Image (cartoon, rainbow, N blue to C red):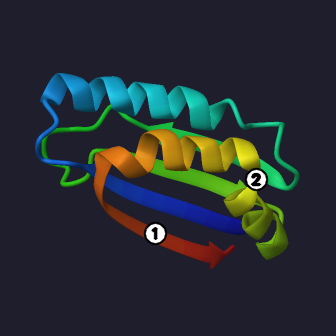
Amino acid sequence: MVKHIILWQFKDELTDDRKKELGNEIKEKLEALQGRIPGLVDIHVQADILPSSNADLMLDCSFTDEDALNGYAVYPDHVKIKDGIIAPNVKLRVCIDYKE
């Protein structure tokens, strides 16, 4: 099993309301990929964060293996979300991938 975890910080110029709206939209779209991408075992986005957090959004997903993770990275539906919604609104992305 391979874990893929990402933390994002939204751009500073976005209002808190816009950040919340974006977080919910990204959550809905990414979690809808469940069952559609080969090797994607589980996907969860945490958008409801506590004020003590220094990230705005977290992605936590599991894949059968590294090949499945690599396939997810270029899967058209994922790329559309990443390039169309996430990248234009994020100032910082931190990622960790590891084998369980």
Give the residue at mark 1: 95
Residue at (37, 33) in percent of width and height: 23
Location of residue 33 in the rendering, given as x and y in whole percent from the top left corner: 72, 37
User: Up-down: is 27 above or below 57?
Assistant: above
Looking at the rendered structure, the secondary structure element under dot 1 is: strand
Residue at (36, 30) in percent of width and height: 22
Location of residue 83 in the rendering, given as x and y in whole percent from the top left corner: 52, 49
Query: Which of the two marks, 2 or 1, is nearer to us in this view?
Result: 2
Query: Residue 94 is drawn in which quadrant?
Result: bottom left
Location of residue 88 in the rendering, given as x and y in whole percent from the top left corner: 36, 47
For the residue pair 71 and 45, the one nearer the viewer reads as 71
Figure quadrant of the C terminus: bottom right
User: Up-down: is 67 above or below 16?
Assistant: below
Question: Within 10 Å of the Cα at label 1, are there few (<14), some (14-19), or many (20+) other Cα atoms?
Answer: few
Figure quadrant of the N terminus: bottom right
**Dot 2 amino acid type:** Tyr
Query: Residue 54 is drawn in which quadrant?
Result: bottom left
**Dot 1 amino acid type:** Cys
Residue 75: which numbered mark, if any? 2
Label 2 and label 1: CA atoms lie apart by 18 Å
Location of residue 95 in the rendering, given as x and y in whole percent from the top left corner: 46, 69
Residue at (19, 22) in percent of width and height: 17
